[in-house]
Amino acid sequence: MQITDIKIRKLFEDNRLCALVSITIDNAIAIHDIKVIRGPERLFVAMPSRKDDTGVYRDVAHPITAEARSLLENAVLEKYNEELEKAKAPNNEDVE
């Protein structure tokens, strides 16, 4: 599995929800509405989900292995941190 594109769709300030993200895998599959969430101890990535008939939220798409989850989470958080730095830069200039 190769994550070929990551787009930070929206950044949120002063919320538990920090960002909405879309990724592309192998230039063939897109997953939208991935969330970057501020937890009590760290940022984490939550996969898109919806409420089932019993009121329980279930992931619509998710990594199967711990290695795939780690790869996805690390890539998304790295991109999120890059976008956050760009947003904080004076005049929103690129930070290198």
Image (cartoon, rainbow, N blue to C red):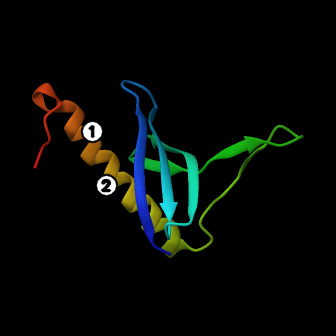
Q: Residue at x 40, y 28 (%)?
A: 12
Q: Which mark is residue 73?
A: none
Q: Residue at x 73, y 42 (%)?
A: 50
Q: Position of residue 95 (x, y in %)?
A: 12, 44
Instruction: First in sequence, mark 1 or 2: give its number.
Output: 2
Looking at the image, the residue that sits furthest to the front is 27
Q: Residue at x 43, y 26 (%)?
A: 15
Question: Amino acid type of disc 2?
Answer: Glu
Q: Hey, which quadrant is residue 8 in on the image?
A: top left
In this orientation, which residue lies closer to the viewer: 12 or 8? 8
Q: Position of residue 35 (x, y in %)?
A: 51, 43
Q: Position of residue 90 (x, y in %)?
A: 10, 28
Q: Hey, which quadrant is residue 86 in on the image?
A: top left
Q: CA distance from mark 1 to mark 2?
A: 10 Å
Q: Residue at x 42, y 65 (%)?
A: 4
Read off the residue under disc 2: 78
Is disc 1 in contact with disc 2, using a CB cutoff of under 8 Å?
no
Q: Count residues near mark 2 (Cα–Cα under 10 Å), then give few for <14, some for 14-19, many for 20+.
A: few
Q: Position of residue 28 (x, y in %)?
A: 56, 66
Q: Is residue 18 above or below residue 77?
A: above
Q: Is residue 29 left or right of residue 45?
A: right
Q: Is residue 95 above or below residue 93?
A: below
Q: Secondary structure at mark 1?
A: helix
Read off the residue under disc 1: 84
In this orientation, which residue lies closer to the viewer: 69 or 20? 20
Question: Amino acid type of disc 1?
Answer: Leu
Q: Is residue 18 above or below residue 74?
A: above
Q: Secondary structure at mark 2?
A: helix
